[in-house]
Amino acid sequence: MQEKQNNNTAYTAIGIVSFITISFLVWLIYFKTPHQATGDWVEQLPAINALLNSISFVLLCSGYVFIKKGLRSLHIKSMIAATISSFLFVASYITYHHFHGDTKFLAEGPIKYIYFTILITHIVLSIPLVPLVLTTLYHAYAENFSSHKKLAKITFPIWVYISVTGVLIYLILNNFNV
């Protein structure tokens, strides 16, 4: 009974945090007028974001390999580091969009369709990723490894996809959007 009550409390908190986070990001990207910053540092943030996504990808894959090899301690360290890298990405992403706003994609031809397919799937899958990551981490912390493993099988591929497509979006924007 106590475990169920703890889970319900955790799920409620995760739901609230996820809703607030996703709502804030939607407002920030689609409705807020950018607050223009002075200096070139804002223009460096997309590269930092791509780097953080790359780091998350490497750490996620390392954590996966570690758990498959039974190296639980290294798995935990990798997944905590992947979470921190993703958190830093979100902070940098918010900062960039606060000062710069949305980046318009102006390229034409097949790359336009490739870009928007990647972007749309990236956005759609990033929405459930927030509660999935938080819930998966909660079950690991609560040592409910059965639920953790079930959720990780869903969370891991989505998190990897989001990390990889985040880098692809950056590369396409910086190589075709002239």
Image (cartoon, helix red, strand yellow):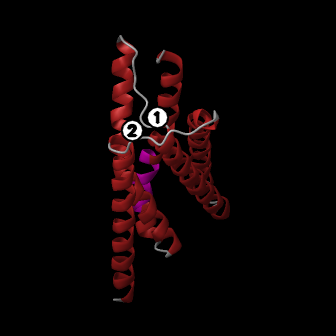
**In front of the other: 118 or 142:** 118
Residue at 40 percent of width and 16 percent of height:
111
Q: Quadrant of residue 162 in the image? A: top left
In this rendering, position of residue 101 left or right of residue 83: left
Label drawn at residue 122: 2
Q: Secondary structure at mark 2?
A: helix
Residue at 58 percent of width and 46 percent of height:
56
**In front of the other: 132 or 102:** 102
Q: Secondary structure at mark 1?
A: helix
Most prominent secondary structure in the magenta stretch? helix
Does the stretch in magenta take in 50? Answer: no
Question: Which range of residues does the magenta coloring cover?
Answer: 150-158
Amino acid of disc 2? His
The CA span between labels 2 and 1 is 6 Å
Residue at 59 percent of width and 56 percent of height:
84
Callout count: 2
In the image, residue 48 sits, relative to residue 109, either above or below, namely below
In the image, residue 8 sits, relative to residue 147, either above or below, namely below
In this rendering, position of residue 78 left or right of residue 108: right
In this rendering, position of residue 109 left or right of residue 55: left
